[in-house]
Image: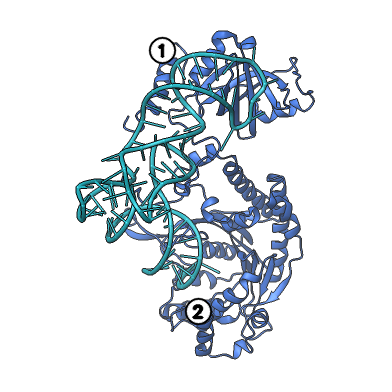
Amino acid sequence: MDDDPTLVKERRAKALRLRAEGREPFPWAFPGRVPTEAVANACKSIAQGEADPTRSFRVAGRIRAVRGHGRSAFLDLDDLSGSLQLYARVDELGENGLARLLADTDPGDLLGADGVPVVTRRGEPSLRVTAFEILAKALNPPPEKYHGLQDPEERIRRRYVDLLASPESRARFRTRSLLTRALRRHLDGLGFLEVETPTLVPIASGAAAQPFTTRSRYLDRELQLRIALELPLKRLLVGGLERVYEVGHVFRNEDMDSTHAPEFTMMELYWAYADYTDMRGLLEGLYGSLALEVAKLLPGSPAAQEAPARFRAPFPTVDFVEELERRSGIRDLLGKSREELRALARSAGATVPEDSPPGKFLDKLFEHYVEPTLDRPTFVLDFPESTTPLAKRHRSRPGRVERFELFARGIELGNAYTELNDPDEQERRFREQLSSRGEDHYAYDSDFVEALRFGMPPATGLGIGIDRMVMALTGTASIKDVILFLPTRERSPG
RNA sequence: GGGCCCGUAGCUCAGCCCGGUAGAGCAGGCGGCUCUUAACCGCAAGGUCAGGGGUUCGAAUCCCCUCGGGCCCGCCA
C-alpha cells in the first residue's frame, strides 16, 4: 500500500503470519462477551491482592496500552462501558501463550479475553487472563496513548479515530444520543406524535436562509433541501393531527463557525389549542427532565453538577423591550424611527445594511446589550412586531407579538410563538417579505396559504436547535464537537 | 470579507527570532524484566519539515504565492 511504509507493513505482516499459522486475524464473532464494567463491579467485593477463581468473565475491546514484564504483562482494554486492565502471566497462559500475546498484538487491535477477576496489590481491578483471541487486527496504529488525537482538523475528518482514542469524545456523543432519546420520551409522554416530513421540497421556507439546491430527474424540476420544519408541520395541524413534532436535519447554505453548521438537527413542535404561555410550561418541564438526564449520563462532570440546579423551574422572564432599555439606557425604544435605531445599532458595533427593517436593528441591539447577560435560563417575552414577521400579534400589547426565546449562557435554547393562522394575514406578510430589500426573506409558499384557508386551529409552535441544546447541557464550546461527521474542504495536497 | 496564529516521523511536540543540511517522547523492531498502570532499562531503525516559487555558497528557519485548519471581529440563525 502507498500509505505508511513501515508501521502498516509490519502490522499487515503480523496479520498474514497469524493467518498462515491457522489463526484468523479477522474472525466472525465472539459470543458470550460482557462489558468490562461487569468485571470492575465483580472486583468491588474482592480484597486487594486477591482473586475470585470461582467466577469467570469474557470481555472484548480495543487494546490501548501494553506493559510487558518478561514473564507477565499488563494490557489496558477499552470498551464502551469503560476500561479494564488485563493481567497476563505465564502461570495461566504458558510460555508459548504469553509470547504469542505479546508478539501478535499491538495497541489498537481488538482483543477478546477470558479470565477471572483479580484486584492487584496496587488495587487495580483486573482480569487475569486464561485465554485470548485477536478479534480484529488494526493495520493502522492508533494515536499516541496519552495525548490522543489533538489536531482539531483530523478529529473532524476522521471522527472514528477521535472516538477510538478519546473516551471523552465517546461519552459526549453517547450523551447526545441519549438526550435526544429522553427528549422524544418526554414529548411522547405529553401525547405528541413524532412525524417525518420531506427533506426535498419545491421551495425551502419557514426561515430566512440560503437553501441548498438539487434536481429531480423524474419530476424534471429543481428541488431544495429544507431550511426549517415549520410549514409541513403546520399543515398537519390543519389536517387534525393536533400535537406533532419532528426531529430532523435542516440545511442552510451559509458560513460555518463554532455555533453554525451547514447541516444541523432541529426539533420543531406544534400544539393545537394552546398558546405561547402553555409552551413556556412545556419547555420548563422539558429542560428540567433533560438536565436530570445529563446528571445521570455524565456523573462527576461539571455539567452534571450544575445542570439540575440551573434548569430548575420556573425560569425567570424578562420583557424584550424593558430589558433592552434597562441594559442599554435607551428610552422609548418603540418610539424611535428607523434612522434613530440604525444609529444606535451602529454605535453598538453592528454593521447592518441601511435599508434593513427596524426590527433588524432592535435584534442587533438586543444581541449586544442583553444576550451576553442571560446566563441562567431566562425567557425573553413579547418581541416587537418588526422583529418577527411570522408570529401572531399580541392579544393585548400593541406593537408586540406573542413570542418568546429561551436563553442560557448566551445560547438560544428555544424559540416559540403563538402561531399565525389567519390565511389573509399570512399572505400579506409573505408579500411584505418578498418586497423587503437587501435581506434574506421567507420564500412565498402559496400552498401553505392555501392550507390555512381550510382552517388551522389556534396553536403554539416551538423550535429547538438540538446541537446547541446539547452544547448548553453538556458545556461544550463548539458545535463541531457535538456533530459526528461534518463536510470539510478537500484535503490539502500532500 | 478583515486581523492574528498553526501545518516538522503513524501520534504528541521541540527546533524557526539569530540560515550551516532534523531532534525527543509514544507506537513499531531486537534484547532484558512475574504487581505494572503515561511501567522501566539497553540497542538499532523511522522524515517530500503542507505544496510551489524566490533570496542565499547554503533554507524547516528569511520573503512571496497557494492549499488546509484554529481563534477573534464582521456577516449569517
Give chain A's shade.
Answer: blue
Q: Which residue is mark 1?
A: A20
Horizontal placement of A215 versus A332: left or right? Answer: left
Horizontal placement of A213 versus A486: left or right? Answer: left
> Is there any visible trace of residue A197 in the rendered image?
no
> Is there any visible trace of residue A284 in the rendered image?
yes
In this figure, which colouring scheme has been used for the structure? Answer: by chain
Q: 10 Å neighbourhood of mark 1: few (<14), some, or many (≥20)?
A: few
Q: Chain of mark 1?
A: A
Nearest the viewer among B66 and A178 is B66
Q: Which residue is mark 2?
A: A429
Element class at badge 1: helix
Q: 10 Å neighbourhood of mark 2: few (<14), some, or many (≥20)?
A: some
Q: Chain of mark 2?
A: A
Nearest the viewer among A318 and A211 is A318
Nearest the viewer among A427 and A331 is A331
Q: Amino acid at mark 2?
A: Arg
Q: Locate the C terminus of chain A and report the quarter of the image it occupies.
A: top left
Nearest the viewer among A444 and A37 is A37
